[in-house]
Amino acid sequence: MFTGIIQGQGEVLALRDSGTERRFTLRPLFTLPSIVDGESIAVNGACLSVETHGENVFTAYASAETLSRTTLGRLKTGDMVNIERALAMGDRLGGHLVSGHVDCLATVRSVTGAGQSLCCRLVFPKEYGVEVIAKGSVALDGISLTINACGPDFLEVNIIPDTQKRTTMRNWRTGTLVNMETDLIGKYVRSLLGAWVPGGNSAAKETEIAAKAGGLSREMLLRNGFI
């Protein structure tokens, strides 16, 4: 679990492909002490596990699924990435709860000045619009951001100067692809309400059907995770 508060940037030192999978060698450009093999580190918002590590360097593996859903497959040697270690129990939750499981790719449509901040508009696949709300949270390339405005297939966020300095966001241009993770709590709410929205989950629909048929029972509720 992460918070979307980027600790710093890292450099892609090497890439090694194995079929449809890839291993990355990454060098944090900030102090990242006591790395442990097997720990989770978010790279541009995608949760990866440390395989090996050395003096301020570590390697991580990305499966074909991860490469197909994120921008990691587009990285090249020398590219910069956003890095965040997993949240430790008792840490400050400065951003919002981020799982590191990217939902989709969003495309930067515009970047305009807004005082010292930058206002960015991004578009994304319409099926995720129900999980995006004004003044809600979203993770873009791992950065926890507040949604200023949104529609069925777009959102707007403001990037303050400190975020511009700490992250790869300052390199965003029209057409840039970024990893997008919608709000974790919102996804659970959507799933639980699935019986009442188009394309909802089968467990909630089974509950509704059973209730109408007089078959609502403790066993059925337990089976579908409602209690």
Image: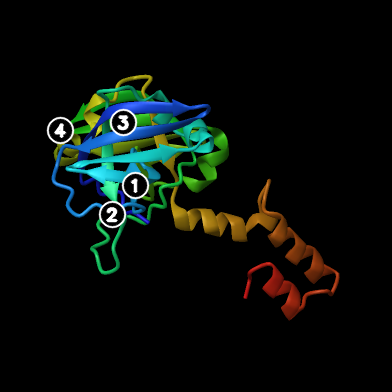
Q: Secondary structure at mark 2?
A: loop
Position of residue 212 relative to residue 68, above or below, is below
- Which amino acid, by three-letter code, is at mark 3? Cys
Q: Residues within 10 Å of mark 3 (few under 14, many from 20)?
A: many
For mark 2, what is the residue? Answer: 36
Quadrant into which the C terminus falls: bottom right
- Which amino acid, by three-letter code, is at mark 4? Gly
Q: Residues within 10 Å of mark 1 (few under 14, many from 20)?
A: some
* Image depth: mark 2 or mark 3 in front: 2
**Contact, CB < 8 Å: mark 1 with mark 2?**
yes
Position of residue 207 relative to residue 176, above or below, is below
* Image depth: mark 3 or mark 1 in front: 1
* Image depth: mark 2 or mark 4 in front: 2
* Nearer to me, 213 or 206: 206
- Which residue does the image show at 36% across and 42% down from the upper left? 45
Residue 184: numbered disc:
none
Q: Position of residue 136 (x, y in %)?
A: 38, 50
Q: Residues within 10 Å of mark 4 (few under 14, many from 20)?
A: few
Residue 120: numbered disc:
3
For mark 4, what is the residue? Answer: 115
Separation (CA) of disc 2 from disc 3: 36 Å
Position of residue 28 relative to residue 111, above or below, is below
Separation (CA) of disc 4 from disc 1: 39 Å
Compared across the picture, whether 183 is left or right of 52 comes to: right
Compared across the picture, whether 64 is left or right of 83 comes to: right
Q: Earlier in the sequence, mark 2 or mark 4?
A: 2
For mark 1, what is the residue? Answer: 50
Separation (CA) of disc 2 from disc 4: 41 Å
Q: Position of residue 115 (x, y in %)?
A: 15, 33
